[in-house]
Amino acid sequence: MKLTSKGRYAVLALADLARFDNINPVSLRDISLRQGISLDYLEQIFSKLRKKEIVQSIRGTQGGYILKKRAKEIKLTNIFDAVDEKVKTVQCKKESKKGCNGKLTKCLTHNLWDELENHINNFFEEKSLEDLIKKDTNERRI
Amino acid sequence: MKLTSKGRYAVLALADLARFDNINPVSLRDISLRQGISLDYLEQIFSKLRKKEIVQSIRGTQGGYILKKRAKEIKLTNIFDAVDEKVKTVQCKKESKKGCNGKLTKCLTHNLWDELENHINNFFEEKSLEDLIKKDTNERRI
DNA sequence: ATATACTTGACTATTTTAGTCAGGTTTATA
DNA sequence: TATAAACCTGACTAAAATAGTCAAGTATAT
Ligand code: FES
Ligand code: FES
């Protein structure tokens, strides 16, 4: 059960962006250098973030990205949703009445995994980008 | 971020085992048939569970496995630990002082992922096998 | 003009997962 | 004591997912 680097990078890059956002657009090149993430990979990620209206792009020289919403309004849920990082604990299709291997009833552990999924998603619903940069500023990191 | 089937199967198989445990040893063949898990795969899993003293094997005809501890005392944590299903959210080594890409300080998101890891592990610490079969018996499933 | 920086889609190496397979050993029971 | 049920072990492998790379653009501030 692990977090993929796509999700991890998306949040990291946005946290970086959020810190410089108030001044100028931030170029992916800068984020790439500061955070050690491949530029090409960042582009893939930001393309998705833009489509979900989490960031806005500004083209041309001195261009870059800015947040499209306030940091407080961007929850981890929104970010993960944008980059298709999803939490999946059950094996069956959740909507279906059928169980794990096409059985007629849900398996012994179905409810447990469902609870787990909610438990994790709650965490993502609660945390916003703002929480991240607030905490960080206190500790003075780069 | 998803649960692997090794972890899912381990818990499912143990839940099945726990329900019949009071009478006779339960053979992997039975679990395999009831839960639709490959016998060979189950053997791999139970070998690990045995090494961590979660189950005990009884060889020969009419043999099988029984729980080595009370269902109440077997937490999901113990099961996941046995089968090497681990929660991994940070990219860096947790013990090390260094950050994500060998940087000198921890990255912007390190604390966040660490919180997440704890959040998930708390869930596993709280749930025992007993919780699972109790809940199930109420609902009469197979 | 031109360099900077966004944009897109296809492609690929690596790693992880989810098993399979073969060849054992042990022991209850007929 | 023969035999079949069931545990035991390690090596192997196909498929899926991940984590990128690469190529070929377009837009715009200076
Ligand atoms: S996880 Fe849903 S039925 Fe098994
Ligand atoms: S996750 Fe630990 S430093 Fe980035």
Image (spheres, coloured by chain):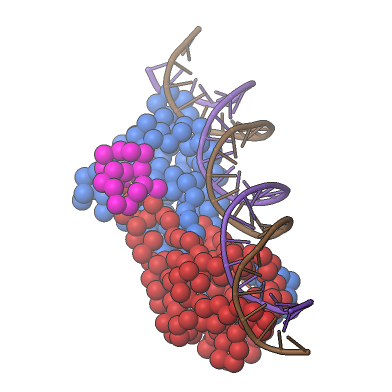
Chain colours: A blue, B red, C brown, D purple
Examine the image and state in which quarter residue B64 appears: bottom right
B95 magenta-colored: yes
Examine the image and state in which quarter residue A31 appears: top left
Image position, residue A76 (x, y; %): 43, 56
Taking the spot 47% from the left edge, 40% from the top edge, the residue there is: A56
Image position, residue B133 (x, y; %): 54, 85
Image position, residue B63 (x, y; %): 63, 81
Taking the spot 39% from the left edge, 52% from the top edge, the residue there is: B90
B71 magenta-colored: no
Q: Does residue A124 appear anywhere in the picture?
A: yes
Taking the spot 45% from the left edge, 70% from the top edge, the residue there is: B52
Residue D30 in the image: above or below residue A116: above
Screen quadrant of the C terminus of chain A: top left
> Looking at the magenta stretch, what is its main secondary structure?
loop
Give the total number of marks visible in the rendering. Answer: 0
Q: What are the residue bounds of the magenta stretch?
A: B91-107
* Lateral position of residue B33 relative to residue A82, left or right: right
Residue B141 in the image: above or below residue B95: below
Taking the spot 47% from the left edge, 84% from the top edge, the residue there is: B71
Residue B134 in the image: above or below residue A93: below
Q: Does residue A25 appear anywhere in the picture?
A: no
